[in-house]
Amino acid sequence: MLMCGCDDGMLLEIVISKKESSQEKKSVAPSALVEKLKHTLTSYRRKLDTTAEELSKSRKLCEKLTKEADTFREMIKTKDKSLEDTHKNYTRTAKELNKTRASYNELEAMVSKLRSSLETTSTSHGKDRNRIQELSEEIMKLVKRHKQDNEDKVACLHGLYQRLTAARVLLPQQDKPPSYFSWNDLAEMVYEQVVSLVESLHQAEEKTKTMNENLRSRDEVVTEMQKSHEEQLSRLTALTREREASWTKQKEEMEQHYKQLLADLQLRTKKSQAMADQAWEKMRATGGVQQGLETECSTLRQQLSEAQTQSRSLLTACALLCGAVYPLYARMNALSSQRHLLEEQMVLWDNCRDRARYLVNVLTAELSQPEHPRVHDRKLPRKHLLGFRVGVIVVLAAHRLVRLGQLCCRCFVAYDTASAGNGIVVLTGGVKLPQILAPVIRTEDVSMQDSTESTLPLASSLRVPVGQAHLLGWLTSSALAETVTVCMADITDAAHSSNSGGTPIEHRALVAAARSSFSKLMDHLAQFFPSVKLQPVAALRDRRSLTGRLTRSLARLLEGMNVVEKNSLVSSQELMVALQNHILDFIQRLHSVEIERRQLLTELGNLKTQIAGLGSAAEAADGSGDRPIKFVVMDKFEKVCNELNEALKREQTAQQILNEQSKQLQELTLRLDLCDTQGVQRQQTLSEAMIGLSEMKDDLRRREQELRQAKKQILQMEFQRKSLQTNLRDAEEALHTAAKDKEILAHYLKSVEAALEEVKQQLLHPQQSGSATSDSAIVMSKLLLSTDLIPQDIGKAGPELIACQNLVGAFVDVHHQSMTRLRTLEEERVSLHQHVNSLKRELSDAVHREYNPDLPTHDNYDLVPSISRSDISYKDEFRPLREDSEASFSATSMPSSPEKSLSKSAFRTVNKSPRLLTPKTAAHKSRARLQVSSAR
C-alpha cells in the first residue's frame, strides 16, 4: 500500500508538471481540465478513503501485534525465569551429585575395609576350623582309648557278676542287667563336648594321663577284691557241696516221713485255695485296671493318630501356603518396581499438566476481549460448596484412618527379606474386632457402610497393639488347627493312597486334591481375618459407592464452570480440549491474516496497473494541448498535495513499523526456538542427571545391603565364637566333673576294700573281734552300706559310682542271703544229728532187747524232737523217692568188723526213714539184717 501511495504521488507530480508545461505552450479548455481533475480527485478521494480504512485496519493489526509481542515478551520472561530455576536446580543437583559421589567413595572405602576384615576373619575361621578338626581327630583317638578302658572295666564287673551267679545264688529280680554298667552315655557326652576343645589340649592330655593312672589303680583294686571274693566263694562252694551231699542222703531217707504230712498238706491246700480265691479276686481287680489301661492306651493311640494327621495336614498346608506366598512376594516386588516407574511418569505428567494449564490460562487471558479483566492477575474465589466438600472429605478420611488403626491386626513388618526395600506385613488372625453401632444400610452398599461406620465415635486405642496382644492365642489356636486338618483331608488321603512313583493319573488326582483343599483353606481363612475384606473389582466401579457419588456430585458442580474457574479441578481431557481450541483459533487467525496479506498484494498490483493507465492517459491529454490548464487555485492544490505527501509519509512510517514488527516477530520466534532447544537440552541433561542419581541410589542400596550382609556375617561369626567358647567351658567342666567322679570312685572303692578287709578279719578271728558269726552279715552290711564311705562334697553321683554302689548292695544282699541259708542249714544239721543219736540209742536198745527181752521198752521217744514246722520249707524242690536195693548190702560195701557193719547199716536205714520208724519195725529190720550178715 505504501508503494502504491508513492507511485501515485510521483504520477501526480508528473501530471502537474506536464500540465504546467503544456499550459505554457497551449491554452487548453478549462472545463475539460476541471472535469478531468474532478474525476481524478474523486478517484484519489476514494483511494484515500480506502487507504485510510486500510491504515485503521493496519493500526488495529499493529496494536494486536504489539499486544501479542507483549504476551510473547512475558512468555519469554517466564521461560527465562523457568530456565534460571532449572539452571539453579541443575547446579543444586550437580552439588548433590558431588556430595553423593564423595559419600559413595567413602562407602567404597568402608566396604573395602570391611571386605578385608571379612577376608581376615574368614581365614582365621578356616584356621580355627582346621584346628578344630585336628583337635576333634585327637579327641576321637582319646575317646577310643577311653572306651577301650571302659570296656575292660565293664568286662571286669561282668566277670564279678558271672562269678556271683555261678554260685547258684538267687539274685532278686530288681537287679539290673550287665549292660547297665556300661559307660557309653558318659563317653558320648564327653565326646560331644570335647569336639569343641581348641586351646586346652595339653591340659586334657595331662588329665587323661591322671585318669588312666586312677583307672589302673582302680582296676588293680577291683582285681584284688575279685580274687579275695573268688577265694571266699570257692571256700563257700566247697562247704556247700559237702553239706549238700550229706543233706541229699538225709533227704532220701526222710522222704517217707512226709507221707504222714499229707493230711496237713491237704488242710493247708484248703487254706491256700482260699488264699488263691483271694488272689483270683485281686487278679480280677488287676484285670479291671488292665482294661482301664487298655482304654487309656487306645485313647492315647487315637490321640497320636489325630496328632499325626494334624501334623501331616499342617505340613501340607504350610507347603501349599509357601508355594503361594513366595510367587506373590515376587509379584509384589515387581508391582512395587512398576509403581515406582508409574510414580515417576505421574510426576512428569503432573508437571506437563501444570504447564498446559498455565498455557491455557495465559492464552485465555490474552486472547479474551479487552473489557474482561485478566484471570491470572487476580485470585479466583472458591465456591463455598467446594470448600464444604473438602472439609467433609477430610473428616471422613480422618475417621477412616482412626477406624483402620483400631481394626488393624498387624503383628510386625518384616524388612530383612530377599528385597530390603519392600516389607511383608504379618497379621494376627482370630481377633475379635470391636462392635460399633451403625444405622441399617443395604447389604450391597458396602462402601457406604464402611464410611458411616468410620464417622461414628471410636473407642480409645490400647497401648499394646491388637496384633501383638493376640499373637500367642493365634499361634496356639485350636480352631485354626481344626480348620487346617478339615481342609487338608482330601490331599492327605490322596497322598496316603498314591505311591512315591505313581502313574500320571495319580499325579493329576493329587494335584486336583491339592487345588480343592487349597481353595477350601482360603475360603475358611476368611473367618479368622474379618478386618481384611477381599473386595472384587466390580465393587470398585459400583455407582452406588461413596466414591461414585462424590465424583458425580463434583461433576454436577463443575458442569457450568469455565476451565479457568475450575483451576486445579479441571480434568486432563478438558485441559487438552481447551488447549486444542486455542491452538485452532490461533491457526485460524494466522490463516485469516495470510489471506488479508494476499488480498492487499493483489490490490497493490491493481493500483499499479491503474496508475500506469493514468500516466498513459495524462500523456495523451498533454498531447492534445488545446485546452487551458489553470482552473484551480494553487493554494488548494498545494494543500491537496501536502495532504497527499503527509499520507504518503504516514504510509511509509506504517510500512517501516510493520517491517520492524515483522523483524521483531522473527527474532522472537528465533528466541523461542532457541529457548525450546535449550529447554529440551536441559531436560535431557536433567533426565540424565536423574538417571545417574537413581543409579547412584541403587548402587548405594546395594552397598548398604552388602554392608548389612557383612554385619550379619560378623555377628554370626561372633555368635559361633561365643558358642565355641561356651562349648569349651562346658567340656572343661565335664572333664573336671569326670576327674572328680573318678577320684570319688577310687576313694569309694578304697573304702569298700578297707571295709571288706575289716569284715574278713572279723570272720577269720571271731573270738578276737568279739562278734558271733550270726552277726557277720549285719556287720558287713553296716560297714559296706554306711554313708561314711561316700564323700560329703559330692553333688550328683556319676553312673560309675551308682553302678559300684549297686554292685556292693547286690553283693551284701547275696552275702546276707547266703549267711541266712547257712544258718538254717546248720540248725537243720544239728537237729538231724540229735535225731540220729536218738535213733542210735533206740537201735542199741532194740539189739539189747533181742538178747535180753526182759528189758523195758521206752515208748516215749521223741522221734522228731528238733524239727519244727517253721523249719519245713514247702518251697524246696524234692526229688522222687527211691526204693531200697539189696545191692547196697553187698560184701564189697560191708566192713570187716560186725559191729561197724551193724552200725553203718542201722545208720543207713535210719537215714532213709528217720521219722517213720517204730521200735518194732526197727527191731524186725535189724534182726533181718543180722541174719543176712550171719549167713554171709
Image (tube, rainbow, N blue to C red):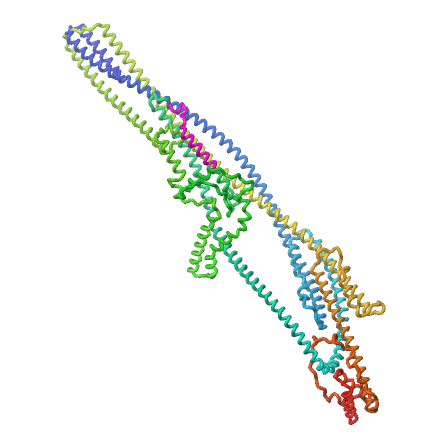
Q: Nearer the viewer, residue 866 or 475?
A: 866
Residue 465 picture location, percent across and down: 54, 42
Q: Nearer the viewer, residue 411 or 918?
A: 918
Q: In this image, 489 relative to 805: left or right?
A: left
Quarter of the picture containing the N terminus is top left
Task: Examine the image and state in which quarter residue 807 appears.
Answer: bottom right
Q: Residue 398 lies in magenta, yes or no?
A: yes
Give residue 230's position: percent from left, percent from top: 75, 70
Residue 724 covered by magenta stretch: no
Q: Is residue 565 above or below residue 653?
A: below
| Residue 689 in the figure: left or right of residue 804 | left
Camera sees residue 263 = yes
Identify the image quadrant of the C terminus.
bottom right
Q: Does residue 58 sit above or below 534 in this rendering?
A: above
Residue 228 picture location, percent across and down: 77, 68
The magenta stretch is 374-399
Asked if 382 appears above or below 535 in the picture, the reply is: above
